């Protein structure tokens, strides 16, 4: 899927219909703790709203269906989805008690912090279509969708906005969800399930799992409970935190900087700019992986090695440190969960002497494997224990690698114009997302919107891409 911010998304006008979940019962409290990522995300979003700051803590999916979409069929689709998936009928709400310090509360009630959990019985949920009207201006449509997404994903429930832009030749389905309850893997699953349910509804066939398999869809609350139980047993000097301790010690207790000047202090969140880089074609990506395999690593190791080599060329620093995102869907039952099942782990390795890409790949692979081995140690919990006094309210800049080729229906992304949307960017440093799809590898980059970053970051990224293209050319040749 393409990845773009909503400011750059301009869907064609058409008739807008939204799908509104409703319920006829009161929410029921639950005692499952929020994950560390959810807690940091929800509390930060609440603080920004309280300060009157506009913010967009959501991610969204948009894709096309052929012809003028069937509203009744899509209504059936969304009723099935909100009933089946825990992420759409359970949630957390910040609890505001002016006599209680949130940090003190979190320490004395580590299961929930200052968040309360709620759920709705799935069979109490129904979905009704709401016909918003016809838009004839792309600008007016964009402004309406941006405003509605921000508004609807900021409420406690349902924390999502689903709709369709109907046109005679093709229609655009969109759904935005508070990031606390979804991630890129979840959106890929949703792309496939919406289309599968829609085809079934149009044909008058059932789309839910067969009665022979009555087990409920797996949910994220089970994951949350296990994460908190494991995390509370961690100790600062435990082996699970050795990689974090080494990572921070290599930077005198701090996080890594970026190889070029950004014009920021590295802490203040500034308006961000989005850069989009086509890195490799599908064939070039296969050749690059062949080159990496030949030198002791996989595609991700090769990408990190290229980043490290370019860093050395720009700064002379042969130690590469970066935070990288990993999936925490560690066993098959979690593969189908709608939720935010992601962690950020510390990657550290040293370039060989003399520095070359071929020599760096094996070192990067070892560093990547060690980082992934600590994937069940939550970022925020690790920093609480080993980064004294550190700010753990936000995710530091990172590099993410996602191989999206194995996701269900990924071959249809291009034909359906499938797109991941994010809100307007904000950045204190540089974050990067390498995404490998069947036809290409793209790099999406968020940078602080400063003159220094605009001048320096593209030069560094151009060099990274050049290194990868050179390796791809070598990988396409038979091994000697």
Image (cartoon, rainbow, N blue to C red):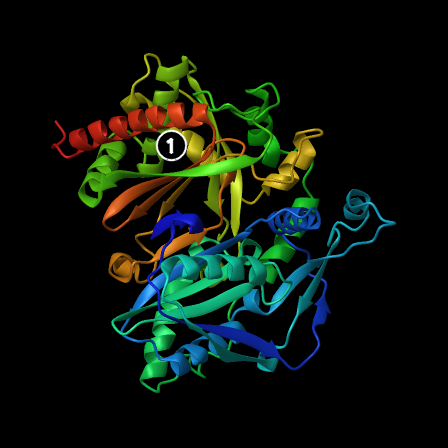
- Residue 166 found in image quarter: bottom left
Question: Image quadrant for the C terminus?
Answer: top left
User: Height in image: 157 above or below 115?
Assistant: below
Residue at position x 18%, y 43% in the image: 283
User: Height in image: 136 above or below 392?
Assistant: below
User: Height in image: 20 above or below 156?
Assistant: below
Q: Is residue 274 visible?
A: yes
In the rendered image, residue 282, in percent from the top left (x then y), is placed at 21, 45
- Between 176 and 365, which is closer to the camera in this rendering? 176
Left or right of residue 256, residue 389 in this image? right
In the rendered image, residue 41, in percent from the top left (x then y), is placed at 61, 48
Left or right of residue 168, residue 393 in this image? right
Element at label 1: helix
In the rendered image, residue 103, in percent from the top left (x then y), is placed at 78, 43
Q: Residues within 10 Å of mark 1 (few under 14, many from 20)?
A: many
In the rendered image, residue 299, in percent from the top left (x then y), is placed at 31, 38
- Residue 27 found in image quarter: bottom right
Which residue is labeled 1 in the image? 365
């Amino acid at each position: 899927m393409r990845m773009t911010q909503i400011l750059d998304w301009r869907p064609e006008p058409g008739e807008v219909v939204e799908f509104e979940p409703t319920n006829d019962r009161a929410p029921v409290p639950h005692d499952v703790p929020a994950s560390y990522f959810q807690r940091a995300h929800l509390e930060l979003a609440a603080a920004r709203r309280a300060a009157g700051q506009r913010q967009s803590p959501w991610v969204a999916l948009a894709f096309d269906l052929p012809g003028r979409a069937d509203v009744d069929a899509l209504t059936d689709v969304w009723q099935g989805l909100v009933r089946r998936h825990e992420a759409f009928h359970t949630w957390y709400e910040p609890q505001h008690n002016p006599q209680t310090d949130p940090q003190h509360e979190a320490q004395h009630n580590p299961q929930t912090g200052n968040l309360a959990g709620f759920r709705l019985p799935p069979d109490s949920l129904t979905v009704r279509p709401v016909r918003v009207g016809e838009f004839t201006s792309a600008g007016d449509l964009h402004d309406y969708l941006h405003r509605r997404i921000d508004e609807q994903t900021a409420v406690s429930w349902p924390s999502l906005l689903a709709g369709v832009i109907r046109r005679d030749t093709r229609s655009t389905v969109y759904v935005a969800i508070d990031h606390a309850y979804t991630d890129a893997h979840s959106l890929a699953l949703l792309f496939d399930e919406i289309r599968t349910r829609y085809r079934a509804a149009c044909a008058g066939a059932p789309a839910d799992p067969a009665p022979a398999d009555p087990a409920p869809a797996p949910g994220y609350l089970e994951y949350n409970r296990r994460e908190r139980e494991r995390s509370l047993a961690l100790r600062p000097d435990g082996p699970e935190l050795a990689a974090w301790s080494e990572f921070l010690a290599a930077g005198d207790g701090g996080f890594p900087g970026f190889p070029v000047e950004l014009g920021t202090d590295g802490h203040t969140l500034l308006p961000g700019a989005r850069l989009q880089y086509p890195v490799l074609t599908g064939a070039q990506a296969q050749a690059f992986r062949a080159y990496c395999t030949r030198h002791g690593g996989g595609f991700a190791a090769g990408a990190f090695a290229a980043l490290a080599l370019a860093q050395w060329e720009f700064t002379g620093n042969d130690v590469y440190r970066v935070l990288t995102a990993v999936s925490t869907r560690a066993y098959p039952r979690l593969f189908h969960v709608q939720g935010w099942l992601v962690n950020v782990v510390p990657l550290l390795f040293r370039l060989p002497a003399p520095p070359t890409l071929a020599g760096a790949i094996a070192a990067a692979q070892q560093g990547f494997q060690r980082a992934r081995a600590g994937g069940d140690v939550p970022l925020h919990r690790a920093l609480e224990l080993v980064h004294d006094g550190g700010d753990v309210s936000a995710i530091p800049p990172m590099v993410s690698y996602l191989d999206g080729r194995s996701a269900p229906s990924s071959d249809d992304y291009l034909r359906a114009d499938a797109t991941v949307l994010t809100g307007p960017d904000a950045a204190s440093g540089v974050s990067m997302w390498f995404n490998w799809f069947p036809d290409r590898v793209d790099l999406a980059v968020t940078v602080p919107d400063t003159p220094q970053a605009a001048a320096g970051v593209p030069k560094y990224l151009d060099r990274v891409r050049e290194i990868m293209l050179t390796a791809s050319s070598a990988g396409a040749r038979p091994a000697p």
